[in-house]
């Protein structure tokens, strides 16, 4: 009998922070249906198609200095995504210069441009750049991805193995209206809500979990995996910049100003695709082989030096259509990445 996904709950996705074990006696076939037979096949097929596009991707060449993979998402639920728009801006050499810095006076000189969060027809765009920010040279692998269960996680792990980063910083839309959430951990659980195609259209049953776990419990991973950064320290070191950012946008009132929300542990309500990529990537860094898409995909990334990984949620009220706001968010994130005391 064909299963049905209750898409009546899809509007609630925009309020989820992220963009249970099998019962005893669960068979191997049941372990291989976390996205359903059709959904698992679709993710595996799309991932192979992404890998076959040799005109893009990141490599371990380039600067030997700090190497960071930064990912962001495309539109979902017909809403554009600030995380993808920031990554897109950093990808564009015609807009974002090779050398830049946070303005000393807090006044931003914003060029004219149209923000773009599209991850392309294949569901992912990867561009590598050598950038200097605040005097710190860094090699960046910049990824725009569709909000799709398991596919986004597979692309991040694939590009991470090729790029060999020191750190993987994943980003997405959050539920907090004004808070920049610095997540502390990810949970091995899912919500039965649909993923979205590159245009932000719901995929329904072809990309929605059947299981309530991301990775089978038989692999003996903890229910929560901690992230490899210090949210409190980052919030403290970059709070003044976020205040300047708010001031520049006229968000002076306490209830409107952007603020950091450093988490101390994983949010139990964070069970959507942002949590999916976070847990899958953190699990992939621990395991020799990580099964995704019901076992149709197995990622076995190898690293010369194990990278750290964490997730940042932008405020829900971020305005993706405002070029000045996207420009300032890019400055804030570039500053965090460049800060040798913020990211290990």
Image: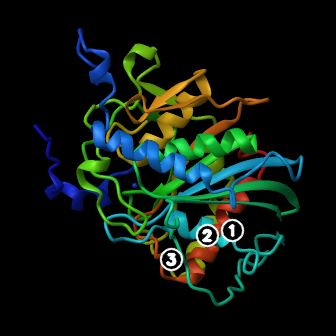
**Mark-to-mark CA distance, 3 and 2:** 28 Å
The residue depicted at 34 percent of the width and 27 percent of the height is 32
Q: In which quarter of the image is residue 97?
A: bottom right
Residue 243 at least partly seen: no
Residue 214 at least partly seen: yes
Q: Name the residue under label 3.
A: 252
**Judging from the image, what secondary structure is the residue with disc 1 in?**
helix
Circles 1 and 2 in contact, beta carbons < 8 Å: yes
- Residue 91: numbered disc: 1
The residue depicted at 40 percent of the width and 36 percent of the height is 293
Image coords of residue 40 (percent x, y):
36, 39
Image coords of residue 77 (percent x, y):
31, 65
Judging depth in this view, the residue of 273 and 338 nearest the camera is 273
Q: Mark 2 points at which residue?
A: 88
Relative horizontal placement of residue 181, taking residue 176 as reference (left or right): right
**Judging from the image, what secondary structure is the residue with disc 2 in?**
helix
Image coords of residue 284 (percent x, y):
57, 30
Judging depth in this view, the residue of 195 and 172 nearest the camera is 195
Relative horizontal placement of residue 216, taking residue 114 as reference (left or right): left
Q: Indicate which disc, 1 or 3, sits on the residue closer to the N terminus.
A: 1
Q: Which is in the foreground here, disc 1 or disc 3?
A: 1
Instruction: Name above or below for residue 324 compared with residue 277.
Output: below
Location of the N terminus by quadrant is top left
């Amino acid at each position: 009998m064909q299963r049905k996904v209750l898409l009546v709950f899809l509007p609630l996705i925009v309020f989820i922070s992220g963009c249970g074990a099998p019962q005893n006696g669960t068979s191997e076939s049941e372990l291989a249906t976390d996205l359903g037979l059709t959904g698992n096949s679709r993710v595996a097929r799309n991932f192979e198609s992404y890998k076959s596009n040799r005109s893009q991707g990141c490599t371990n060449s380039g600067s030997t200095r700090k190497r960071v993979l930064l990912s962001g998402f495309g539109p979902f639920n017909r809403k554009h995504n600030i995380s993808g728009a920031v990554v897109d801006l950093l990808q564009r050499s015609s807009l974002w210069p090779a050398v830049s810095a946070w303005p000393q006076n807090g006044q931003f000189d914003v060029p004219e441009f149209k923000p773009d969060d599209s991850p392309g027809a294949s569901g992912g765009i990867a561009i590598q750049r050598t950038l200097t920010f605040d005097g710190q040279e860094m090699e960046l692998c910049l990824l725009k991805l569709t909000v799709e269960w398991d596919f986004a996680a597979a692309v991040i792990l694939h590009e991470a193995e090729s790029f060999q980063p020191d750190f993987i910083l994943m980003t997405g839309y959050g539920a907090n209206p004004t808070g920049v959430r610095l997540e502390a951990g990810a949970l091995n659980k899912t919500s039965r809500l649909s993923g979205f195609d590159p245009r932000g259209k719901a995929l329904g049953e072809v990309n929605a979990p059947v299981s309530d776990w991301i990775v089978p419990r038989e692999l003996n991973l903890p229910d929560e995996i901690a992230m490899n950064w210090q949210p409190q320290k980052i919030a403290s070191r970059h709070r003044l910049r976020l205040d300047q950012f708010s001031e520049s946008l006229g968000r002076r009132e306490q209830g409107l100003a952007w603020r950091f929300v450093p988490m101390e542990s994983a949010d139990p309500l964070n069970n959507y695709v942002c949590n999916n990529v976070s847990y899958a990537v953190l699990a992939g860094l621990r395991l020799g082989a990580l099964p995704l898409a019901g076992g149709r995909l197995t990622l076995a990334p190898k690293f010369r030096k194990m990278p750290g990984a964490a997730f940042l949620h932008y405020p829900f009220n971020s305005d993706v259509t405002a070029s000045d706001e996207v420009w300032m968010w890019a400055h804030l994130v570039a500053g965090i990445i460049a800060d040798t005391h913020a990211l290990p």
